[in-house]
Amino acid sequence: MTPMNVLVVDDEPAIRQVLSAAIGKAGHQVSTAASAAEALARLGKGDIDVVVSDIFMPVTDGIELLKLARAQGFDATFIMVTAFASVDSAIEAIKAGAHDYITKPVRNEEILHRLEQIGALRGLREENRALRDLVLGGGRRYRFTSPAMRMVDHLVARVAPTASTVLIVGESGTGKGVTAREVHELSTRRDGPFIPVNCSAIPETLLESEFFGHTKGAFTSADRARKGLFLQAHGGTIFLDEIGELPLAMQTKLLHVIEAKEVRPLGSEQVHKVDVRIVAATNRDLPAMVREGRFREDLYFRLSVFQIQMPPLRERREDIPGLIRFILAQQGGGSGVPLAIDPEAEQMLLHFDWPGNVRQLENVLHRAAILAEGGRIRVTDLPAEISRTTFARGRSEGAGGATLRERVRAFELKLILQAIEEANGDRRLAAQRLGIGLSSLYRKLDEYSSEESTG
């Protein structure tokens, strides 16, 4: 579950109290407002992710609150609540931009499920947006220098204008979500919806309902009809991230949708034709899963009509220097002056293996930018894991001729980095535990980084 800041808006104190208690108990931060005016003031702080608002309130109702929030540029997701099961108000709320609509009395499990869905969707969208800004530069594609990424560009350009299903494979953090969106935006469906779905974030019991929708009364908590994700994506693209996490039963149903181009909501006898392009992604080994009987072979062949392999960062190190400068240019702190990085620190980043790939590199640089003084990132601003790993690699490569002094200094560095890690990056505390001054600790780290950069 993704913790969020939730604002509960209702003119009835008892309802505010009950909803706040349930939402807070689930791990979310909760604020309350008794009116639309209070809600707008709270939204003005800029940290609200979700608004759970009553529709029927005196003076300014929930739908008007939603419209005012949108007009003022607040991007919080709205869930509308009412005691009156009015189809007209539901339609009006959705048209105004509400994410969902539920009726009183609100069951705790229902509101928490809605919040879980929103959290997963917001998380995926923010990750895609961050990676897109990182790799595409907010609409301007970053020009990678590695042949591997140039090949990805070439494949995207070739497959995007076609109707082919696309399977994007690669490790976490390599930009699969960015590539999926680019396939959509370079296609003839660019004006249609792009619906990202994290298959691993939806409980197995709700997958069919989420994918294909349901009618009112289809199951116990289905108090109204719901449009499934495939119908929402009609005329556009649906991005099935983490496709390897789908259970076998759902794989069979997905295969039918691909072949028949139709869906049937739960509880309905009526089928709906859907015109949807499927782009799927996974960090799993699907052929191995097929051999083990955990993924349908026919579905795999349907999804992998055209496959794009996203290379890990450690296999395209020539992209790292340019990415470092690109990321630092985005993190200049609003000053307009990009952060600089010492050559020694850059060398350490260049030789790290990056199991989290581009996403991990961005996180490391973001942390280092916070610690950096004077607008320059130094070795001492990098996580201990980076320094320890790259130094150990350099020493292991030349261990055969290591002198006693070199071995002692390597052991000393290991102790220093271990102390920093155990102090959660607090170098002052690490120095105290080691019994040395802070300036001595910094001097030693600088000496080791200089030795590492010179071999």
Image (spheres, helix red, strand yellow):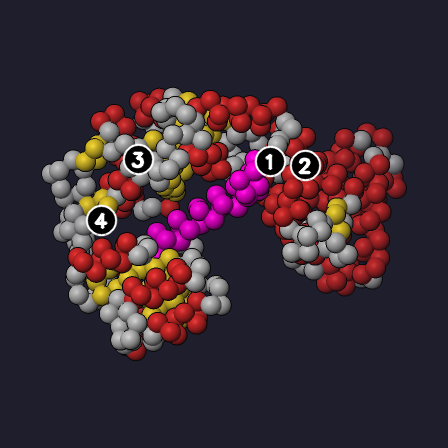
Distance, label 3 to label 1, CA atoms, is 29 Å
Distance, label 1 to label 2, CA atoms, is 9 Å
Q: Quadrant of the N terminus?
A: bottom left
Front position in the image: 9 or 157: 157
Q: Secondary structure at mark 3?
A: loop
Answer whether labels 4 and 2 touch (C-beta < 8 Å). Answer: no
Question: At 81% from the left edge and 38% from the top edge, which residue is drawn?
Answer: 453
Question: At 26% from the left edge and 75% from the top edge, which residue is drawn?
Answer: 58
Picture layout, residue 375 above or below residue 204: below
Distance, label 4 to label 3, CA atoms, is 19 Å
Distance, label 1 to label 4, CA atoms, is 40 Å
Q: Looking at the rendered structure, which numbered label has been put on residue 235?
A: 3
Which amino acid type is marked by label 2? Gly
State which tag comes first along the sequence, 3 or 1: 1
Q: Which residue is mark 4?
A: 226
Answer whether labels 4 and 3 touch (C-beta < 8 Å). Answer: no
State which tag comes first along the sequence, 4 or 2: 4
Answer whether labels 2 and 3 touch (C-beta < 8 Å). Answer: no
In the rendered structure, the answer to whether residue 93 lies left or right of residue 126 reads left
Answer whether labels 1 and 2 touch (C-beta < 8 Å). Answer: yes
Q: Looking at the rendered structure, which numbered label has been put on residue 142?
A: 1
Q: Which x, y percent locates residue 201? A: 37, 46
Which amino acid type is marked by label 3? Gly
Which amino acid type is marked by label 4? Arg
Stretch in magenta:
114-142
